[in-house]
Amino acid sequence: MSELIDVALAKEKADLIVANGTLVNVYTGELLEETGVAVKGEYVAYVGPNWEGMVGADTVVIDAGGRFLVPGFIDAHAHVDNLYMVSEFVKYAVPGGTTTVITETSAVANAMGYAGVVAFVEVLKAQPIPMYALAPAMVPAYPDFESSSNLSNEEIEGILELPDVVGLGETYWPRVIQSDEDVLRRVAFARQLHKPVQGHSAGARSNKLAAYAAAGILSCHEPITADEAMERLRLGMHVMVRDGSMRRDLEAISSIKDRNIDLRRVVLVTDGLWPDDLLELGCVDFLVRKAIGLGFDPMKAIQMATINPAEHFHLDHLVGGIAPGKYANLLLVPDLREVKCDCVISKGRVVAEHGRMTVPVQADAYPEALLRTMHLPCKLVAGDFAVEAPDGPSKAQVRVMDIVGEMLVAEHHTMLPVVDGHLQADPTADIIKVATLNRYDGLGTRFVAFLRGFGLRSGAMASSVCWDTYNIVVAGAGDDDMAVATNRLAELQGGVVLCEEGRILEEIPLPIGGIISTLPTVDVRDRLLHIDQELVRLGCTLSNPFLTLQTLTFTGVPHLRLTERGLLDVRHRKLVGVVV
């Protein structure tokens, strides 16, 4: 601290000075020309015009030449805990200007338990930018109906106490307003630590939404319309406007800029990026550009990606703006509407220039035990995917999971034939089988159901990336291929596998906890694209089949969901069978 004081008083020389820039001051909303930023170590010591006396023989001086000095961007609701390594994410997010990340940990928590979350936090700390975690709120989300690497209250509280954990992750509203004892205990503990609780309030409104806010939930990333965003803002919540690979809601919500309201509680977030979007669009820089293109004032758009999230997470003493005492996280940007970075500085180091990293990034390191998390008792055979029929009739009425949107599944009833006492799928009528298997209990506990809308005429696809339990989900037109795909997935210790007539068409190994690949992001992207191409050939008509497959088990949204204990009627919170 004394070094920063001495540099600001020109008694000591700075390590780095960015001179002659136009400061984007997110605290006041001003653009301040002829500004210099003096850096000592990781921190800003001085901001202003009187920097020349801080230059010494060893001081690195970067002449901004009038370019804008923009605070490093913050992704305040990320999911960098599955598909690709954190180090791979950093390589592509940082050059665009994302210098701080706050990520959920629900995937590593469900897949790898307490040890996995602790290891993941250590991986975050090893990166060249500040990266923070949110403690998982519900592992699994609904323990009465599903299983994963279940975390106790004490384990979640232990995670919350870690210094680099800055809040409690997204907390589903039904369990909160039902006064679930475990959930309210975790919320109270987070509040005791002054760590904000993140929300997940899709479908909540009016009194239910107010009750949710009353419990201490401080943010939500689920609004999909301007009116939904306004309702949450009026309750004092931070609204995290999501525009990433799961959903793109910024355009639909953008009209809030015309409502003459204070935008200080509006935050731009990705909610997770798939490899293709990360590689082609970037990270938060893309959101800022899009917001400006939709008519937001550039200063407001930048504030929504810097100071607003920093204040929400009580990190504004470190990040969110360019000011003395903060981390030296700043971007050199020629055009404030294009927001393309010439140079990215994080913690006082130049970490990227002209779209490329300039510092090494350390590969993720995990304990060996977390590389072997597939605990199926034996190889599966076609008969393991048989569905017993009621005695007697040659046909039976069954419940079918009916895909009506990328992440929406309704309940459909239809008659299916019975052969040798087992219900038969009918791929010609777009009815195939889908199953989920518990990979944690060592028993391979499973449930097999029927699915409409996937479109497969042949083949099967299996994945150990499936919300929120990260068990195994497999969909297929034939039982033999379902067994082949699942067995190969187990051999890989997790992954995504597509097969047809016993032949593996493509696979993505995910050996870290069964959810994270060690491959370069480009390779993961290319393999996912190949899977999409092969699925089209096999008859699939979905726009995003991998997303649909992995969310068939997601019990956080209506209507009919797949668990290893049965089909879950989400609205009525009860398990139902296949046969009606």
Image (tube, grey):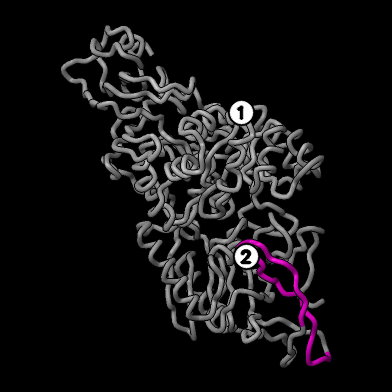
In front: 65, or 70? 65
Q: Which mark is residue 133?
A: none
Q: Quadrant where the N terminus lies?
A: top left
Residue 254 visible? yes
User: What's the magenta region?
Assistant: 392-414
Q: Nearer the viewer, residue 552 or 85?
A: 552
Tell me the kind of residue under disc 2.
Asn
Helix, strand or loop for disc 2: loop
Q: Is residue 134 above or below residue 195?
A: below
User: What's the magenta bit mostly, secondary-structure-wise?
Assistant: strand
Give the alpha-carbon distance from disc 1 to disc 2, as whole Å.
47 Å
- Name the residue furthest left: 57
- Label placed on residue 262: 1
Could you say where residue 439 lies in the image, as x and y percent from the top left?
59, 64
The image shows residue 142 at horizontal and vertical percentages of: 71, 53
**Residue depicted at 77% across the width and 37% down the height:** 210
Note whether 16 is above or below 110 in the view shown.
Answer: above
Judging by the rendered image, the residue that carries numbered circle 2 is: 438
Q: What residue lies at 29% left-to-right and 37% top-to-bottom?
A: 342
Identify the element where label 1 is drawn: loop
For marks 1 and 2, the one nearer the N-term is 1
Total marks placed: 2
User: Residue 186: percent from the left, percent from the top?
Assistant: 69, 37
- Counting from the top left corner in percent of width and height, residue 203 is at 73, 50
Q: Quadrant of residue 574?
A: bottom right
Q: Is residue 113 visible?
A: no
For residue 201, above or below residue 4: below
Left or right: where does residue 431 sit relative to residue 578?
A: left
